[in-house]
Image (cartoon, rainbow, N blue to C red):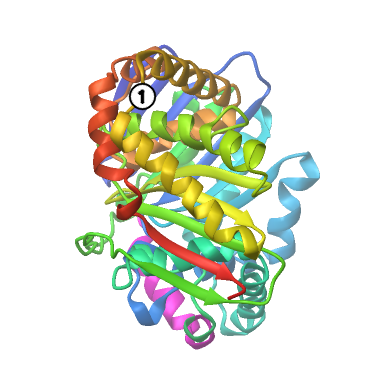
Amino acid sequence: MQTVRLDEGLLRTDADNGVTVLSEQIRSVRSVAVGMWVKTASVHEAPGKMGVSHLLEHMVFKGTERRSARDIALELEVRGGSLDAFTSRDHTSFQSRTLDDDLPLALDVLTDLVRNPVLRQADLELERRVVLEEISIVEDTPDDLVFDLHSATLWPDHPYGFPILGTRDTVGSLAADDLKALHQRAYHPRHVVIAAAGNLDHQVLLNLLAKCGWFTFEPGPDAVAVPSVPAGVRGTKRVMRDSAQTHIVMATDTVPYRDQRRYPILLINTVLGSGMSSRLFQRVREELGLAYAVYAFQSFYRHSGLSGVYVGTHPSSAQKAMDAIAVELNRLADEGLTAEALAEAKQQVKGQITLSLESPSARMHRLAGLTLYEEPYRTIDQTLAEIDKVSTGDIAAVADEFFRADRQTVAWLGPA
């Protein structure tokens, strides 16, 4: 194993079998957040297997070789801790937050979940119904569903356009053997990143992981290749639904996480639609009274990215809201940002980043991201300096490339 010090109290170990372990010691707390990320998710799925990564994430909680589903639910919770998981487009994560004294138990439970699920067909029949209910929740939540509609419109033939939950048909056809095949292929040390932050010692963490077998497990097979991400499909997708509001996403494909242009995109979106002071809030809500909810967003994936605007408005106002948003997008593309507006955006973003890192869980996620996205380590001050380096010229170039209204793909969900 090779261990390097990235910063004061922050170390990284790369084991011979491929597993990466990162930790940050925070002496001022009495807790530890620890997570295990598996580098497989919806972007690695075939069309007929949509949702298999998310279903597997659910199924590991149904029981392991040593624990029942009830044991898993109770073991950390009765000690005041928590256990959670999620599936994203690029990876699947299993996490806990416990008192520092309970770190050995947390690692044992997480390892048991990740390495030893039983994946019984009988359990699958029950959990499949749970996931189908989760799909129903999205279908009944139009301001969530419209984002899935947009991704499917932007990338109709690429896994980034697939719903993470899968579809009723694909989830309904998945068998326990599909879950076992995915687990046997992907849940191995060379595809796992372990990150922890809180009141812990890195060497103690390594010793505990060694007891759990993490450094003697076989590395596992190569990762499944992700198909090249094509340029986004332009156009408008309208799905008619009888509802009180029309929900609209206007967004485009941008850059992957490692691309330094993510900083200008983040700054532009801050000015455009982050908070009450943003241009969209002031124009669409305050001045025109066309919407309660309007905001800009961005997502940076491993192989691509997404940036755009969401608005929910009365059907009679939908076109007016879209027109107002288009004006603001074109204004950014034509004019960029003044030095004063850019300075204000930088201060806002730097403040948000700094405040977001005042918890062990946030620090844990930051550590995991270093390896998941193959980023060089930067201190918080270095990250803030990267934001300060963005110039008005950088803003102008990114705004012209990605923010023109005619580049946006539109998903429209609501009445005709």
Q: Is residue 340 visible?
A: yes
Q: Is residue 49 above or below residue 379?
A: below
| Secondary structure mostly taken by the magenta-highlighted segment of the chain | helix
Q: Is residue 305 above or below residue 45?
A: above
Amino acid found under the numbered disc labelled 1: Leu
Secondary element under disc 1, as helix, strand or loop, is loop
The residue labelled by disc 1 is 337
Is 188 colored magenta in this rendering? yes
Magenta extent = 171-189
Question: Whole-percent x and y of residue 215?
Answer: 36, 44
**Quarter residue 223 falls in:** bottom left
Position in image of residue 16 (x %, y %): 25, 41
Residue at x 48% of width, y 23% of height:
349
Q: Residue at point 24% right, 42% down? A: 401
Q: Quadrant of the N terminus?
A: top left
What x and y, as percent, mark residue 3? 30, 25
Quarter containing the C terminus: bottom right
